[in-house]
Amino acid sequence: MIAALALLLAAQTVPAAPAETRPQAPASVAPAPQLPAPSPAPATDAAALTRVRLSTAAGDILVGVDTRAAPVTAGNFLRYVDQHKLDGVGFYRAVKVADGYGLAQFGTRNDPKRTLPPIKHEPTTLTKLSHRDGTLSMAMAKPDTAAGDFFITVGDLSSMDATADSPGFAAFGRVLEGMDVVRRILAAPTSPTLGEGVMKGQMLAPVITITAARRVD
C-alpha cells in the first residue's frame, strides 16, 4: 500500500498560476506499493452517474460523477462544470509514486475569479467509495477546505480512503473513458525546479490545459 501518499497530496493552493501548491506535510518518499486487495464494495452502476467530458490538450477524459453516494462533493464539481470555471484551467501536477501508481491533479489553484467557497468534507466511510484506479477525488489541505482542485488516481490508492485515524480524501466519481489520457498526463514532463518541499519536481511543464468541461447527455 501507499501509506505516505496522503502526505504527498495534503497541500494548500496559492492564489493563482503560475505559483505552485504549498505543501503542509514533510518531504517524505512513499514506498513501492504492494498488490492491492479487491474492492470490498461494488461501484455505482455507470448509468447512474452524471457524465462529464474533460477535453484536454492530451485528449478527452470522460468521468462519471456520483451524486447519489457523494452529493456534496459531486455537486461542487458540477457547479464548476456548469459555470464553466474549469474551462482553461489545467492539469498542473503529476505525483508519480511508483510504476503504474500516482495521481494527476487539476483545478483552479485558488484563482479568486474561478474558485467557489470550500465545501464540507465527505469521507469515504460515509460515501462507501474508494480510491481505486481512475477515481476522481478532491484535493485539500484539511477537512472542510476543499474547493476547486481535483485529482484522478492511477492504480489502487485505497490508502487515501478515510480510516478511524484519518479523514482521507473525498472520492466522488471515476473515469469511464480516457484512462490512457490520464496515464499520459501522469507520464508528462515535470519541471525539476518548480514546486516547494515535497512537490518539487511534481509540477507539469508545460501545464496540460483543459479546454472545456461539459456534461454529457
Image (tube, helix red, strand yellow):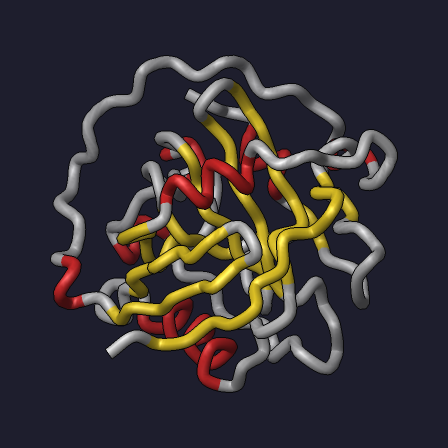
39 vs 10, left or right, is: left
Vertical relation: 183 (above or below) 140: above
Residue shown at 79% from the left, 61% from the top: 17
Horizontal arrangement in the rendering, residue 93 relative to residue 197 (left or right) = left
Residue at 15% across, 67% down: 48
Q: Quadrant of the C terminus?
A: bottom left
Q: Is residue 161 left or right of residue 19?
A: left
Residue 120 placement (x, y as % from top left)? 48, 69
Q: Is residue 31 above or below residue 123?
A: above
Q: Is residue 168 visible?
A: yes
Q: What residue occupies the far right of the structure in this picture?
A: 193
Q: Is residue 47 above or below residue 106?
A: below
Q: Does residue 2 appear left or right of residue 34 in this picture?
A: right
Q: Residue 97 appears at what percent x and percent y?
A: 55, 25
Q: Position of residue 155 (x, y in %)?
A: 38, 30
Q: Residue at x 61, y 53 (%)?
A: 91
Quadrant the N terminus occupies:
top left
